[in-house]
Image (tube, rainbow, N blue to C red):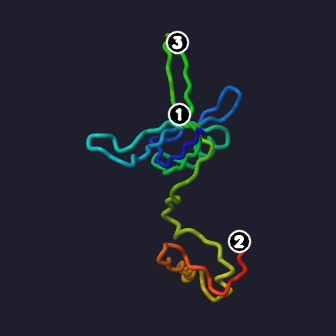
């Protein structure tokens, strides 16, 4: 199975181009923080990504250098020969889906606009003050490490 999920920041503005037949393609690179960092080693990996069609147009329109992005796709390798006959190889992530990982920074906005929740509004709460009740805690385990059976319930299927 060839699945990749990455979260990182764009290292440069995404480059949108069109193929000879008019298909949109966008190439960009994301810096992905490493989970474990060793002294003297890089703290991030720089992953090349390519997006096609509507995904390419979306990335080009809404993401800029430094934007935090989630990329879901697959790893693909390709090779080509240059004009001198030298063989080159590339490994990149082909993005099937991309998502925002942070809200848009807009200094003129006072925050996100939320639609009112009818259930809390009708109950007399406004959306900012309503806190749902906590679920009931699970029953305590007995001495053998099992949950106790409910008393008085003889309708078990086994």
Instruction: Report crowding for label 2: few under 14, some 14 to 19, many 20 or more residues within 10 A (C-alpha).
Output: few
The residue drawn where x is 70% and y is 31% is: 22
What residue sits 65% from the left and 29% below the top? 19
| 7 left or right, relative to 20 | left
Mark 3: secondary structure: loop
Question: Residue 38: percent from the left, percent from the top?
Answer: 29, 44
Q: What residue is shown with label 2? A: 158
Give the number of the mark in front: 1 or 2: 2
Q: Quadrant of residue 1?
A: top right
- Cα distance between the residues tagged 1 and 2: 54 Å
Q: Position of residue 145 (x, y in %)?
A: 49, 72
The residue closer to the viewer here, 62 or 4, is 4
Q: Which residue is mark 1?
A: 92
* Helix, strand or loop at mark 1: strand
Q: Looking at this rendering, what residue extends furthest in the top direction? A: 84
- Please say if 76 is above or below 111: above
Q: CA distance from mark 2 to mark 3?
A: 75 Å
Residue 83: give its label. Answer: 3
Q: Quadrant of the C terminus?
A: bottom right
The 10 Å Cα crowd at callout 3, few under 14, some 14 to 19, many 20 or more, is: few
């Amino acid at each position: 199975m060839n699945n990749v999920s990455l979260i990182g920041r764009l290292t440069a503005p995404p480059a949108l181009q069109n193929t000879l037949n008019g298909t949109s393609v966008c190439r960009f690179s994301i810096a992905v923080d490493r989970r474990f960092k060793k002294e003297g080693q890089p703290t991030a990996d720089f992953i090349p990504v390519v997006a096609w069609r509507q995904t390419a147009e979306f990335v080009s329109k809404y993401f800029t250098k430094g934007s935090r992005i989630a990329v879901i796709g697959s790893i693909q390798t390709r090779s080509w020969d240059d004009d001198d006959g030298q063989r080159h190889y590339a490994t990149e992530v082909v993005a099937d889906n991309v998502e925002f990982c942070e809200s848009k920074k807009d200094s003129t906005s006072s925050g996100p606009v939320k639609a009112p929740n009818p259930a809390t509004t009708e109950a007399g709460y406004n959306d900012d003050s309503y806190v749902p009740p906590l679920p009931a805690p699970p029953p305590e385990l007995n001495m053998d490490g099992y949950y106790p059976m409910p008393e008085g319930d003889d309708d078990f299927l086994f």
